[in-house]
Amino acid sequence: MTEKFDIYNAQKVKIGTGHPRGLSLPDGQYRFIATVVIYNSKGEILLQKRAADKESWPNYWTFAASGSVIAGETVAEGAARELREELGIALDLTLQTEEVADARWFSESEFLTLLENGQAVPHIYAKEIFNYIKSDDEYLKK
């Protein structure tokens, strides 16, 4: 069964539902993507290595358990589902082999080395991802 998505305008107001996965949205229409980043008390980030047969970024490390929010879900529900689907995290870590080949904790310097060596997904904000653990709410601590 093909996943379907709710459709939103630029103001994040729902304007439709049932858009199928794989079809582009027209200009001015959007869908939500949920992304979960996990840090531990040591300030390390949990990275997952994408499965070798993934269409995009196979065998690359990424900090994001993410995916589309499906029709009828809230963003929080989509985030929880993606975290469970990709890493098996509800209470335990159980990798889903069709999604993830490996997962482990990385320090900031280790992660930046992966980026520099072309082994991690080069998300636009990848080099700043450790700043989020240094923040309260959405603002960096002084």
Image (spheres, rainbow, N blue to C red):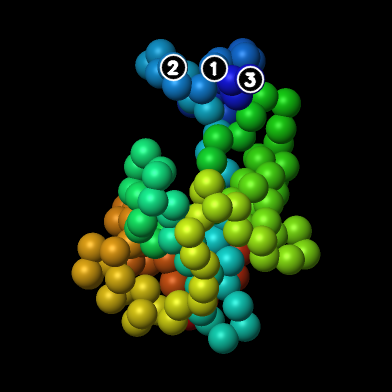
- Mark sitting on residue 23: 2
Q: In the rendering, at what x and y percent does residue 37 appear?
A: 55, 61
Front residue of 87 and 73:
87
Q: Decide: is 140 above or below 94.
A: below
Alpha-carbon distance for marks 3 and 2? 15 Å
The local secondary structure at tag 3 comes to loop
Q: Amino acid at mark 1?
A: Pro
Q: Residue at x 56, y 15 (%)?
A: 19
Q: Residues within 10 Å of mark 2 (few under 14, many from 20)?
A: few
**Residue indicated by mark 3:** 1
Query: How far apart are the two marked residues, 1 and 3, measured between alpha carbons?
Result: 10 Å
Q: Name the residue at 63% across, 15% down.
A: 17
Residue at image coords 67%, 65%: 93
Mark 1 — residue? 20
Residue 77 screen position, x and y as percent:
72, 42
Residue shown at the point (33%, 66%) measured from the top left: 127
- In the image as oriented, which residue stretches furthest toward the right? 91
Q: Which mark is residue 10?
A: none
Quarter that holds the N terminus: top right
Residue type, numbered disc 2:
Leu
Cβ atoms under marks 1 and 3 closer than 8 Å: no
